[in-house]
Image (cartoon, helix red, strand yellow):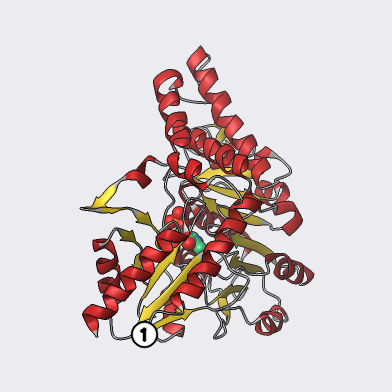
């Protein structure tokens, strides 16, 4: 046992819910959003109860306390992903906003008509649509690294696309549908050889394994707090200092300026240049508590636990009739998407819900990937630090019920 699973589970009040009469909750949807431990909930409550004030503005005690807590959160989150400087950590609302910030601010300034962006077929809509919007606006070209039958990127295609001298490469570190962990470090080395800037979508990686942005040498790295046992409405954009310095502000307003005149403004220094308006202060503090929580368990232990769960789930699911898994590669995180022959994924999810098992059904915001596999939707089970093998047994029992109903 890597850690005391029962003790961990006791930290998450929601896991004790009887979700359906006679059925406790088996939460297998952490890829959508993770559950929150009491420690995170307490940190946010405590902030509101004892320290609530606006930041970077007041000189009174509460304002100073709130500012210190907010900036301590930045330090902690920066260290968590091994950023060189805290000022390279920009607080946003989520991964989606982080990527949009890069597209709208960096992209508008540095990408010129005819420039090429390389993406992959396994991207979440958050790492597709902002680039499509920018491509429409600035007449850019988009090319895509294909995904093979095993759910792995075709790296030979990637290398060929790099020969076309892209200005930007953007890809997810881990797929939210296939669970595939992409070889980010190698991909970044190759992209840098042709002078491209690289953005990594870390929505599914940062919560699940140790990420070192300096070792990866990523230029931009985006992630969301809510998938790493932290609050919703809070995300991070990491960017290398020199690149962020050269990037114009995203949203205009208070706090992002040094000086304002009637016809002009001078932007603030990093990171405040990108944080206009009153930010999500309690959420920053909650995210710092989430980082403390994950680090106390150890990211290596969490990754190994999920690896064991996914291995167990693969074995168990192989005995379920009429079930096909998408993406059967080994270098993967705790996500399994599958289809049941002739049963709509929403029916599968509803039957599972009737026995307390929460999974997601649909296209998981990755329509092009589903289209590639010739399907409209899948059912997805995903695992996190608090999941158990007996919850996977319950998933399998639920799927047997699906088979009984539809056979
Ligand atoms: N995927 C899922 O159920 P936001 O919504 O901004 O926090 O994260 C967007 C996002 C970006 N990239 C990847 C790889 C993701 O998985 C997600 C979110 C959730 O798969 C909600 S759609």
What residue sits 68% from the left and 66% below the top? 184
Q: Quadrant of residue 346?
A: bottom left
Across and down, in percent, residue 25 comes to 33, 53
Label 1 sits on residue:
322
Residue 405 as seen in the image, left or right of residue 163: left
Across and down, in percent, residue 72 comes to 60, 30
Asked whether mark 1 lies closer than 8 Å to ligand 1, one says no
Asked if residue 69 is positioned above or below residue 207 in the image, the reply reads above
Viewer-side residue, 393 vs 224? 393
Viewer-side residue, 254 vs 4? 4
Across and down, in percent, residue 71 comes to 59, 31
What residue sits 27% from the left and 76% below the top? 402
In the picture as drawn, the residue positioned furthest to the right comes out as: 193
What residue sits 56% from the left and 76% below the top? 142
- Mark 1 is surrounded, within 10 Å at the Cα level, by few (under 14), some (14 to 19) or many (20 or more) other residues, namely some
Across and down, in percent, residue 384 comes to 50, 55
Quarter, ligand 1: bottom left
Residue 396 as seen in the image, left or right of residue 188: left
């Amino acid at each position: 046992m890597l850690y005391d699973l029962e003790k961990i589970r006791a930290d998450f009040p929601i896991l004790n819910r009887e979700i359906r009469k006679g059925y406790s909750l088996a939460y297998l949807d952490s890829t959508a959003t993770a559950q929150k431990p009491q420690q995170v909930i307490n940190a946010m409550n405590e902030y509101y109860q004892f320290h609530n004030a606006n930041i970077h503005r007041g000189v009174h005690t509460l304002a100073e306390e709130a500012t210190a807590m907010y900036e301590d959160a930045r330090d902690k989150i920066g260290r968590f992903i091994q950023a060189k400087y805290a000022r390279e950590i920009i607080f946003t609302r989520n991964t989606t906003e982080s990527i949009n910030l890069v597209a709208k601010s960096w992209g508008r300034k540095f990408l010129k008509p005819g420039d090429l962006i390389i993406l992959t077929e396994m991207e979440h809509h958050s790492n597709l649509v902002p680039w499509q919007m920018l491509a429409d606006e600035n007449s850019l070209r988009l090319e895509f690294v294909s995904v093979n039958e095993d759910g792995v990127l075709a790296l030979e295609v990637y290398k060929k696309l790099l020969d076309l001298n892209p200005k930007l490469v953007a890809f997810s570190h881990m797929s939210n549908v296939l669970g595939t962990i992409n070889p980010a470090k190698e991909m970044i080395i190759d992209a840098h050889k042709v002078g491209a800037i690289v953005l990594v979508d870390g929505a599914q990686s940062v919560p699940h394994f140790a990420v070192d942005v300096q070792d990866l040498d990523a230029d931009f790295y985006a992630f969301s707090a809510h998938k790493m046992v932290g609050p919703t409405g809070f995300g991070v954009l990491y960017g290398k200092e020199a690149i962020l310095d050269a990037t114009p502000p995203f949203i205009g307003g208070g706090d992002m300026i040094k000086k304002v005149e009637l016809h002009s403004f001078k932007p603030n220094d990093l990171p405040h240049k990108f944080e206009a308006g009153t930010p999500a202060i309690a959420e920053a503090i909650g995210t710092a508590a989430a980082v403390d929580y994950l680090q106390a368990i150890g990211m290596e232990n969490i990754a190994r636990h999920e690896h064991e769960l996914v291995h167990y789930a693969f074995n168990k699911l192989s005995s379920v009739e009429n079930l096909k898994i998408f993406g059967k590669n080994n270098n993967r995180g705790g996500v399994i998407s599958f289809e049941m022959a002739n049963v709509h994924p929403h029916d599968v999810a509803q039957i599972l819900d009737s026995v307390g098992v929460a999974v997601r059904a649909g296209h998981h915001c990755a329509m092009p990937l589903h289209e590639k596999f010739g399907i409209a939707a899948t059912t997805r089970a995903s695992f996190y630090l608090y999941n158990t093998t007996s919850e996977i047994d319950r998933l399998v029992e639920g799927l047997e019920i699906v088979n009984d109903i539809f056979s």
